[in-house]
Amino acid sequence: METAANLNEQFAETAFSRQSGVFDALYSDNTIINYKRKRVREHILRSLKPGNHILELNSGTGEDALFFARQGFKVHATDISKGMQNELKQKAVQNGMQQMISTEICSYTQLQQLKKKGPYDLIFSNFAGLNCTGELDKVLNSFSDLLNPGGMVTLVILPKFCLWETLLLFKGKFRTAFRRFFSGGGRAAHVEGVHFKCWYYNSTYIKKHLKAGFDIINTEGLCTIVPPSYIEGFAEKHPIAYRCLVYAEEKLKSAWPWRNIGDYYIISLKKKD
C-alpha cells in the first residue's frame, strides 16, 4: 500500500524529472543563486581534507558534484529524480569526471538501501532538497552509519521563518509572508504542473535529532540580508545595494538572530569519534 509520504516522493520525482532538462537554463545565470552556491561551497571546503569522499543527497543536475570533483574529491551523487540523474551522468561524461563521480537513484528516506554505503567523510544536501520530505527524522537517523568517525554533515534547509518573506506583508502578499508559519502539515509546492508538499525545519530540529551522535560546528544564515533569488533582477537593478548587502551578510551570517532568519540556513555537524 502506498503511503502519503511515498506518494509525495513520487510526485516530487515526476516534477523534478520534468524540470531536469531546463533546470540549468532557468537558474544558472541568476546572480543570487550563484552567490548562494559560492557561499555553500566555501562553507563545505573549510571542512574537507584531500582525498575525502562525499555522499551528496538530492544532487540535481550535478553542478555541486562537478565542482567538488574538480577539486579532487570523489562524490557519490544520489537523487530520486531519474531526469536529474540522467543530466548529471551526461555532465560527468562531458567533463571527463566519470572516475570522480558515481550516481545512484535513491530516496534519502531509504539511505540504508544505498548500494554504495561508503563510509563517507561528508554527507551534503544543498538548496532545501530535504524540505521535500515530512520524514526528515528518518533521513537524519541514517547518517551515522554512513559516516567515518569524525565525518561531517552539511545541510542547506529552509527554516520556518524568513525575514524577507515576512516583509512581503507590506506589499500585500499575505499568503507568501506567512506560508512558513502555518506549515505543520506541509505546504503545497508546484513545479512543472505537478503538485507536492514541502515542509520547513528550524535548526533546532536538526540539532535535536543528531545531538546524541554529533557535535554542532556552525550555523550560517543564507539570504538573510541578501534578498532571496526569487526577487528577480535585484542584483542587476541595484548593484551597489546588492554589494553592500553581501558585505553585511558576510559579517553577520553566523551571529544571532541572522543565522536563523534567512531564506535558508547552512548547518554543519561532526560525528563524534
Image (tube, rainbow, N blue to C red):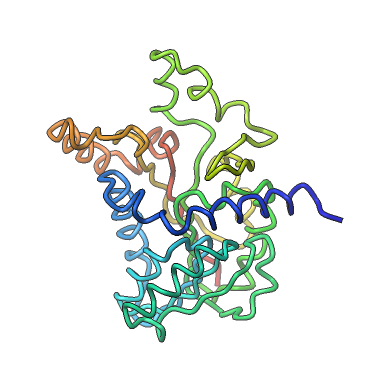
Q: x and y percent of residue 92 in the render?
A: 39, 76
Is the residue 219 above or below the residue 258 in the image? below
User: In the rendered view, does 64 fall on the left or right side of 29?
Assistant: right
Q: Is residue 184 above or below residue 96?
A: above
Q: Residue furthest bottom?
A: 99
Residue situated in front as seen by the camera: 63 or 138 = 63
Q: Give me the residue at 31% from left, 78% from top.
A: 95
Q: As rendered, which of 159 and 48 lies closer to the eye?
A: 159
| Total tally of numbered discs in the picture | 0
Most extreme residue toward the right is 1
Q: Position of residue 130 (x, y in %)?
A: 56, 52
In the picture shown, does residue 34 fall above or below 81?
above
Single out the residue that lies furthest toward the left: 240
- Position of residue 176 measured from the top left corner of the image (x, y, whole percent): 49, 25
Query: Which residue is depicted at the point 26% across and 50% down?
Result: 29
Vertical position of residue 257 compared to residue 120: above or below? above
- In the image, residue 230 lies at what x, y percent? 37, 36
The residue shown at (44%, 22%) is 166
Q: Quadrant of the N terminus?
A: bottom right
Position of the C terminus, as image quadrant, is bottom right
